[in-house]
Amino acid sequence: MNKSNQDKNNLYLRARKEPMCGNQSSEKSQRSPGNPKLLDKEIAMINAYASFGQISEKFNIPLVNKTFGKGIVRVSCRTVTQLDNIPLIIKELVKFHLIEEIGMHPLPHSSKMKSLVLFFKPTGETSRQKIVQVFQKYSLTSFKYHHLMIDVDYPVTKKGSFKSKRIAVENAHSSLRQILQEFNIPCVKETFGSGIVRVCCRSVVQLENITLIMKELLKAHLIEEVRMPLKYAYKMSSLVLFLNPVDIQSNKILDRVFKTCLFKYHHTVVDIEYPAEEDEKIFEHQVVNETPMKSTLKIIIWVTIGIVLNTLLSKIYLIYRVFCIQY
């Protein structure tokens, strides 16, 4: 794309500097009759696109057709002055690590374009405020960029796409098992404790992004163990995770992460009690020390002792009554 843009750029620059003859003059009259500003604007548009490509490659900033998230800054470039200066502004914003991703509309470049709309996804809340301040400043100068801040929701998967959802469930289950094994975090059938974060992944978007979120949480050492289905089943239409935090502070961080997450996971904080200690000890004692035969024999012995004692007491009572009647 850069090579074709440079070729076009050189062609247009020569058209501006060199006198036209014959076919060139007629071509210009068809494209912009009596209005050389259209040619200047097209050149500025091509130069801007070429500059964006260079900035993206140099600073490793993604150029996408659409970007999603909260607090995205939308900037419209309509004039030649705005188009000529926007790459310089973006370069400075990127240098200070204020931009995570740039959405461009349209992408790729089209000769029919009359304006260029950019969507800057900030790296954080502070970055968003700084980007807005920059364009507020330039809106008061001769550049006069039209800008506003918007929230762009992630696309929601349409109902009925069962096949893609099942694939997403299977992929999420497989990738989660791999990442838990990578970080040596136990994957268990049951987990117990207080402040456990229950997270339900239902939509395709939620399933596709849960692994990335979990990876960051595991990197921060916030999770002690995870309860989830140990084996994938074809009938699974969602994936429910129980995240057992390392401590109280980790629980608060996990709760805040899923509260502010743009994918809108349904999550709750629950307490799951351990099994009663007395019942567990009795059960272990019976399993370890007694067999069914021993237990039955004990019952028989105690019943026999009870019968013998009862018989002896009855005989003693009768002897006592006889003795009392005689004397």
Image (cartoon, helix red, strand yellow):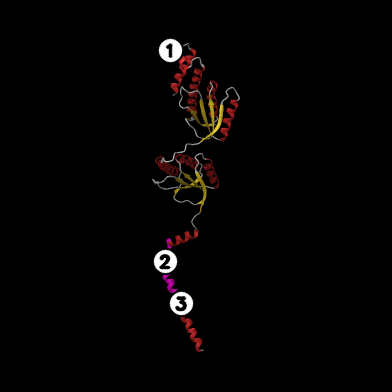
Inspect this view and state whether residue 97 appears: no
Residue 301 belongs to magenta span: yes
How crowded pointer 3 is (Cα within 10 Å; few <14, some 14-19, many 20+) is rated as few
Q: Earlier in the sequence, mark 3 or mark 2?
A: 2
The amino acid marked with disc number 2 is Ser
Which of 322/287 is in front? 322
Residue 295 is labelled as 2
According to the image, label 1 marks what residue? Answer: 23
The amino acid marked with disc number 3 is Asn
Q: Earlier in the sequence, mark 1 or mark 2?
A: 1
* SS at mark 3 in the image: helix
- Provide the residue span drawn in magenta: 287-308
Mark 1 and mark 2 residues within 8 Å of each other at the beta carbon: no
> At x 52% / y 30%, what residue is drawn?
119
User: For the residues marked 3 and 2, what is the alpha-carbon distance in whole angstroms?
Assistant: 23 Å
Q: Quadrant of the N terminus?
A: top left
* SS at mark 2 in the image: helix
Which of 122/140 is in front? 140
Residue 310 is labelled as 3
Residue 270 belongs to magenta span: no
Mark 3 or mark 2, whichever is nearer to me? 3
**Quadrant of residue 4 within the rendered picture:** top left
> At x 50% / y 18%, what residue is drawn?
38
Mark 1 or mark 3, whichever is nearer to me? 1
**Quadrant of residue 129 within the rendered picture:** top right
The amino acid marked with disc number 1 is Asn
Q: Percent x, y for residue 93? A: 55, 28
User: Where 247 falls versus 30 (above or below)?
Assistant: below
How crowded pointer 2 is (Cα within 10 Å; few <14, some 14-19, many 20+) is rated as few
Image position of 259 (left or right of 295): right
Mark 3 and mark 2 residues within 8 Å of each other at the beta carbon: no
